[in-house]
Image: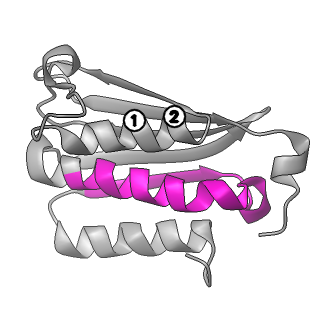
Amino acid sequence: LDDLGILATISWFCREFCKTYSAIKVESRVGLKENDVPMFLKPVLYRVLQEIFNNVARHSKATSILLSLQKREEEIELLVEDNGIGFDPKSSFPSRDSVAGLGLFSMKERTESTGGTLAISSAPSKGTTIRALWPVGEQDSQAPA
């Protein structure tokens, strides 16, 4: 991540994921530049993305994932949608003490600890959408990558 940057790392991660999980097609839409992502956010983005993809592979039975990483005005948006079996986020979202769903909790905690928000939209048989947003100011986006 430090050597390649977030965009190259995400591209590499998606290729490796597809090699390992050949039944899952990944479509990636990246609409930002490397220096649009503040340094502090790069490892967080990567870890959240890893956890989302791990959950898709382990639980969703999805055949496709849409990954979108965009800069929208003063926000960085990570959006991941799958066409899997879905789940009920209200009954599945864990507490800090829960072992089941610890990945969901860690994604939420990582996102919120860096000033972002995480929203999960899912329903049985409807797939899952996870959206993480982080506000970034002009000084954040201009930091060298």
Residue type, label 2: Glu
Q: Residue at (40%, 70%) from the top-left corner? A: 13
Residue 26 falls in which quadrant of the image? bottom left
Secondary structure at numbered mark 1: helix
State the residue position of label 2: 112
In the depicted view, which residue is nearer to us: 13 or 96? Answer: 96
Whether pointer 2 and pointer 1 mark residues with C-beta atoms closer than 8 Å, the reply is yes
For label 2, the crowd category at 10 Å Cα-Cα, with few meaning under 14, some 14 to 19 and many 20 or more, is: some
Magenta highlight on residue 123: no
Q: Residue at (13%, 34%) from the top-left corner? A: 98
How many badges with numbers are in the image?
2
Q: Do we see residue 78 in this rendering?
A: no
Q: Is residue 93 left or right of residue 34?
A: left
Q: Main secondary structure of the magenta part?
A: helix
State the residue position of label 1: 108
Magenta highlight on residue 43: yes
Secondary structure at numbered mark 2: helix
- The span shown in magenta is 25-54
